[in-house]
């Protein structure tokens, strides 16, 4: 690399389609590689990420501030600041913010494929059926 390339601040910025505003909060990709992604996830009070499952990556969540209500498979637990959890691939999971302040999580995704098309929702999996379904 030339000196100009080394000193160019844009070389250190991460631009990812994964970053952005969501109805429940924001995601900011901090660093991304071929088989990993590190993101700062902020969830608004009384909001959460819908249940989902993915098959080609694991996730580690570390609570930076607030309280996280995590459901991973059949297990549900509350995580406080400085606590973490592991979400293995092929496991239905969700995270909610039951508190009054924003929940901030560092999310480390690691796997052979990180594409958004690897995420499925319960309705897509027929795990959850609508209550008003005609029989």
Image (cartoon, helix red, strand yellow):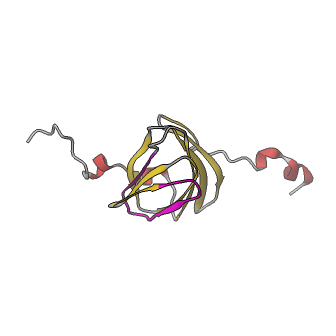
Q: Please identify the quadrant where the C terminus is shown.
A: top left
Classify the position of the N terminus by image quarter: bottom right
The quarter of the picture where residue 31 lies is bottom right
Residue 50 placement, left or right of 19: left
The structure residue drawn at horizontal position 47% and vertical position 34%, both measured from the top left corner, is 23
Q: Residue furthest left?
A: 135
Q: Residue at x 77, y 49 (%)?
A: 11
Q: Is residue 49 above or below residue 3?
A: above
Instruction: Specify whether residue 108 is painted magenta.
Output: no
Percent position of residue 20, x then y = 57, 38
The answer to which of 133 and 99 lies nearer the viewer is: 99
Task: Read off the magenta span.
Answer: 79-96
Q: Is residue 62 above or below residue 47?
A: below
Please, which residue is most extreme toward the right here?
Answer: 3
User: Residue 40's x, y, as percent?
Assistant: 60, 48
**Quarter of the image where one finds residue 103:** top right
Side (left or right) of 92 relative to 18: left
Front-lying residue, 85 or 133: 85
35 horizontally vs 4: left or right = left
Asked whether 80 falls inside the magenta stretch, the response is yes
């Amino acid at each position: 690399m030339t000196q100009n390339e080394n000193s160019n601040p844009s070389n250190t910025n991460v631009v990812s389609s994964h970053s952005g505003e969501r109805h429940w909060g924001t995601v900011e990709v901090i660093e991304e590689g071929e088989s990993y992604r590190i993101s700062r996830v902020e969830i608004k009070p009384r909001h959460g990420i819908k249940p989902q499952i993915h098959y080609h990556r694991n996730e580690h969540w570390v609570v930076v501030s607030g309280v996280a209500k995590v459901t991973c498979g059949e297990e549900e637990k509350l995580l406080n600041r400085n606590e973490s959890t592991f979400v293995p691939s092929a496991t239905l999971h969700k995270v909610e913010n039951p508190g009054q302040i924003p929940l901030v999580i560092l999310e480390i995704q690691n796997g052979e494929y990180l594409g958004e098309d690897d995420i499925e929702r319960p309705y897509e999996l027929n795990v959850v059926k609508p209550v008003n379904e005609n029989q």
